[in-house]
Amino acid sequence: MDNNSLSHTSWNCKYHIVFAPKYRRQVIYGRLKQDIGKILRDLCDRKGISIIEAECCPDHIHMLLEIPPKYSISQTMGYLKGKSSLIIFDRHANLKYKYGNRHFWCRGYYVDTAGKNAKKIQEYIKNQLKEDYMADQISIKEFVDPFTGEQVNKSKK
């Protein structure tokens, strides 16, 4: 089994976590994406949290974390979002004009226990960008003209 242990505890706590930037702004691109990844990795290492799988999508972050039972999920998320927000604004000062008051992340987050589905969740996170891209490609065709608001004749396109 893949159990970990502390002095008097044996544990296997994996959590699927999703959180997004404020207003779901699509700012996690290029250099900022790599920087956010490094920041989150460093913060997790400081607390002894293992990142099993993670993906920075354009407007949200998926992570599969193994969190020791001495930390609650809300405590961990407060730490990750709070500290990373401060570090991001220190490194990228131009973002303060968009976000102000050092609020980079949304207030909420999604969390789910992985249990025996850790492999499936890991695979899902790994393929998240491909699935998003495919969904965007499927929905490109417009049936209403955005300029006039009239129905588009399907036979023309």
Image: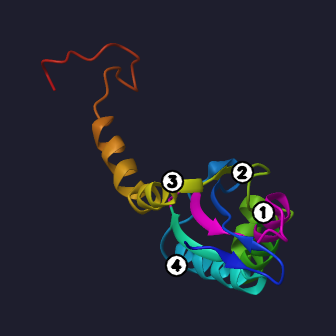
Check contact, mark 4 vs mark 3: CB within 8 A.
no
* Relative depth, front residue between 5 and 147: 5
Q: For the residues marked 2 and 1, what is the alpha-carbon distance in whole angstroms?
A: 8 Å
| Disc 3 versus disc 1: nearer the observer | 3
Residue at the location (35% across, 13% down)? 150
Residue 42: image location, x then y, percent: 68, 85
Mark whose residue sits in front, 4 or 3: 3
What kind of residue is marked 4? Answer: Arg
Q: Which residues are magenta?
A: 57-80
Check contact, mark 2 vs mark 3: CB within 8 A.
Answer: no
Q: Which residue is mark 2?
A: 109
* N-term-proximal mark, 1 vs 4: 4
Q: Of the two numbered discs 2 and 1 on the same chain, state the one appearing first in sequence.
A: 1
- Cα separation, mark 2 vs mark 4, equals 24 Å
Task: Please name the amino acid that badge 1 sits on.
Answer: Met
What is the C-alpha distance between the residues marked 2 and 3?
20 Å
Cα distance between the residues tagged 1 and 4 = 23 Å
Give the Cα separation between the discs numbered 3 and 1.
22 Å
Residue 143: say if magenta.
no
Read off the residue under disc 1: 77
Q: Secondary structure at mark 1?
A: helix
